[in-house]
Image (tube, rainbow, N blue to C red):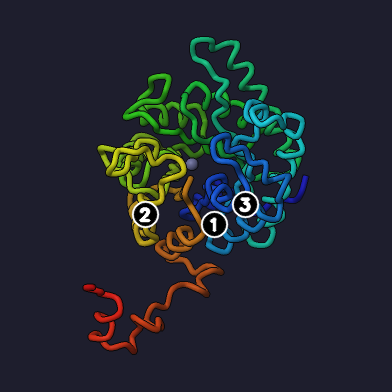
Amino acid sequence: MPVRSQRGILDRLQAGVVLGAEGYVFELERRGYIKAGPYVPEVVLDFPDAVCELHREFLRAGADVMVALTYYAHREKLKTVGRENDLEALNRQALRLANEVAREGDALVAGDICNTWAYDPKNKVASSRVVRAMYEEQLSWAVDEGIDFVIAETNDYLGESLIALQVIKELGLPAMVTLASTRPHQTWDGYDYVDACKILADQGADIVGLNCDRGPATMLPIIERVRSRVSTYVAAQPVPYKTDPAMPTFESLKTASGARAFPIALEPFLCTRFEMAAYAERARELGVNYIGICCGGSPHYVRAMAEALGRTVPASRYSPAIELHPMIGAHVEEKEKEFLVDWKG
Ligand SMILES: [Zn+2]
């Protein structure tokens, strides 16, 4: 097992906010390396340099954690694209890539597991066995390749997330378990999101919270309630989209003409970097310990969030200097700016 970072996730959370960065699958889809629909991270084997590049960009933008791209790299999903035989190779390679780039900075490596689509509360005993075997398999490779902690994410069912938590704890690793929040108030097995986080915390999860589905505006109110209910560390990893009470998740976003925007026509709803910076500040005020971003995330958001948290990161070297812009910079007269950019037609 490779030598891991000297300061683990719990030490870092004890010292202050940890900045996370995810959204690998969405971003690599946009870059042409992953197929939208199945969203299986075949890129890990087919274009490993593309994965390293994105890790590196997140690292330069200030991410404290390199999340191994094993999201949806489980048996069920690989079957759907006919690559079940590549399962172990894909998992191991994803972990090696994350480790390789983490060592270029001072980042931690997280093993990553997620909802399996195999869990069935109506057939709990048998399906739990299948899910557990999938998690054990993926995490045995992760431990072998070297990780600092595990993120179990986008859990639709509390029941499934508890299996993940158990497997992580049996390995003696810190566990971050975050729920999906596609429904108004409850997990798919009927637990209020806040109660579900409390149960996970009581069962020994080190970090609990939500990731994906909701933008900052509709995720933070739930996170605020989670914060007041648990004494463990809290994580928020929203998607950078302008969700609102009427359309609280990115799956529910509709354009003016009523078309569903999810998952590949979401651009009109993207937050600006300033909105994501404001989210990071607000999350810190609320006492969120692990502040991140999920699907739709990209390096410029992470840098803006890092800087909002008071950090100067490698990519800050190229942070905006709009005062030097040829058309709207400090040297351009107001009258001229009006003519050039406040165009009246
Ligand atoms: Zn996501």
- Please state which amino acid type lies under the numbered disc 2: Cys
Near mark 1 (Cα within 10 A), the count class, few <14, some 14-19 or many ≥20, is: many
Disc 2 vs disc 3: which is toward the camera?
A: 2
Reading the chain from its start, which is encountered first: label 1 or label 2?
1
Near mark 2 (Cα within 10 A), the count class, few <14, some 14-19 or many ≥20, is: some
For the residue pair 58 and 99, the one nearer the viewer reads as: 58
In the rendering, at what x and y percent does residue 291 appear? 45, 50
In the rendering, at what x and y percent does residue 280 appear? 39, 55
- Please state which amino acid type lies under the numbered disc 3: Leu
Q: Which mark is residue 63?
A: 1
For the residue pair 132 and 156, the one nearer the viewer reads as: 156
- Please state which amino acid type lies under the numbered disc 1: Ala
Disc 1 vs disc 2: which is toward the camera?
A: 2
Would you say the residues marked 3 and 1 are in contact, meaning their CB atoms lie under 8 Å apart?
Answer: no
| 79 vs 215: above or below | above
Would you say the residues marked 1 and 2 are in contact, meaning their CB atoms lie under 8 Å apart?
Answer: no
Can you identify the residue that label 3 sits on? Answer: 108
Can you identify the residue that label 2 sits on? Answer: 271
Would you say the residues marked 2 and 3 are in contact, meaning their CB atoms lie under 8 Å apart?
Answer: no
Residue at 56% of width from left, 33% of height from top? 114
